Image: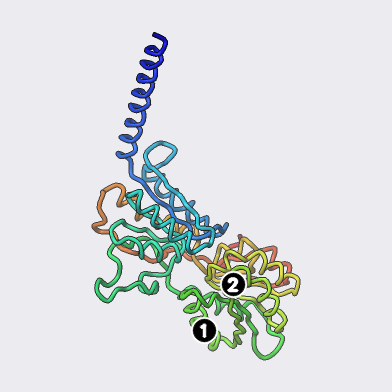
Amino acid sequence: MLYQKNTMKNIFVTLLLSTILLSCDSKKSDVPTVAFIDAFQDNTIAKAKEGFFAALTENGFDEKKGTLNVIYRNAQGDIPTLTQIAKYMISQKPTLIATCPTLATITAVQNTKEIPIFMMVSETVERLQIKSKLDGYPKNLFGIGETLAYVDTSVSLIPKLIKPKGDKIRMGLVFNQSEPQSVQALEEIQKVANTNNIEVVALPVNSSADVQLVTQSLLSKDIDVFFANPDNTIFASFESILKACEAKNVPIMTSEAGLVSRGALAAFGPDMYEWGYQSGLEAAKLLKTGTTEGIAPGLVNKRNRVYNPAMAKKYNITIPEGFKPL
């Protein structure tokens, strides 16, 4: 009799749990799912994720209110892990995939041609080098990209702020030779430098582990300024670069506005939060309509001239009008 009672009780509990689980699954199936892939952990780039979800929330898609399911993974800079994450996200069949930055975008595109991908902190579609001879550019890639034009402007600001020790400004930088966008940026920087009386001293790195040693080597070459170019390795290692440059009394210029708040002197570049927000607005269109019709990859529409007041004071540099303090 006790056995029968326990058995009936177990059956009842099982049925109850099954009903609850089915109910939860049914609820989840009615709510869109966003799979967000970060290639690595970085305080500057994290602002883009904040902006992305802020745009979704403003358009009625909020995980806290139960109107959005979110799956989030961060590869912590590990490429094999990034590939595994992309494949896992695809297996979950989300409504869309959001990617940040370029490496995450490329990895996602390489692994799915069906699920819409909304990029941010990424090169433009044309510069990603993912065009197929058979299919052309990926039909499932959307979101917001950026050209290198803002890098040109950032480099051209240097003569207005930095006084050279000799006839030319010696500008040092490190670049990840394994990242196509980093190599492209270096080529663009060298062109602009040549027309602005700037001598570029560049040293390659292979990973974040190399940055501190290579930066110290660069600083021994009597540079006037360090330029933090758009490179994932730079983002991840910026604090060690800053420490080394401060020890040698060398200011840091950059094309990344987010790095100014972390200790660079000045920049002209996209606001990371706004970049993510802009991509989020595009993603919200898909979530509202259920279709990508009328949605296309776009360009960053907001760039700022910004500076760090503490760094300007430290290096006794007068900042021209038109710069916003961070």
- The circle on residue 62 is none
Residue type at the position of mark 2: Ala
Q: What residue is rendered at 37% in x and 58% in y?
A: 118
Residue type at the position of mark 1: Val
Query: In the image, is 23 to the left or to the right of 47?
Result: left
Question: Image height check: is 104 above or below 88?
Answer: below
Q: Mark 1 or mark 2: which comes first in sequence? A: 1
Question: At which x and y percent is residue 226?
Answer: 64, 76
Q: Looking at the picture, tell me which residue is in the foreground, 283 or 109.
A: 109
List the single residue furthest toward the top: 1
Secondary structure at badge 1 equals helix
- Name the quarter where the N terminus is drawn: top left
Question: At which x and y percent is residue 206?
Answer: 57, 74
Secondary structure at badge 2 equals strand
Q: Looking at the picture, tell me which residue is in the foreground, 119 or 114.
A: 114
Q: What residue is rendered at 56% in x and 86% in y?
A: 196
Question: At which x and y percent is residue 162?
Answer: 66, 78
Q: What residue is rendered at 37% in x and 26% in y?
A: 17
Which residue has dot 2 on it? 228
Which residue has dot 1 on it? 192
Question: At which x and y percent is residue 82?
Answer: 46, 60
Query: In the image, is 133 to the left or to the right of 323?
Result: left
Q: Looking at the picture, tell me which residue is in the foreground, 91 or 282.
A: 91
Question: Image height check: is 236 above or below 58?
Answer: below
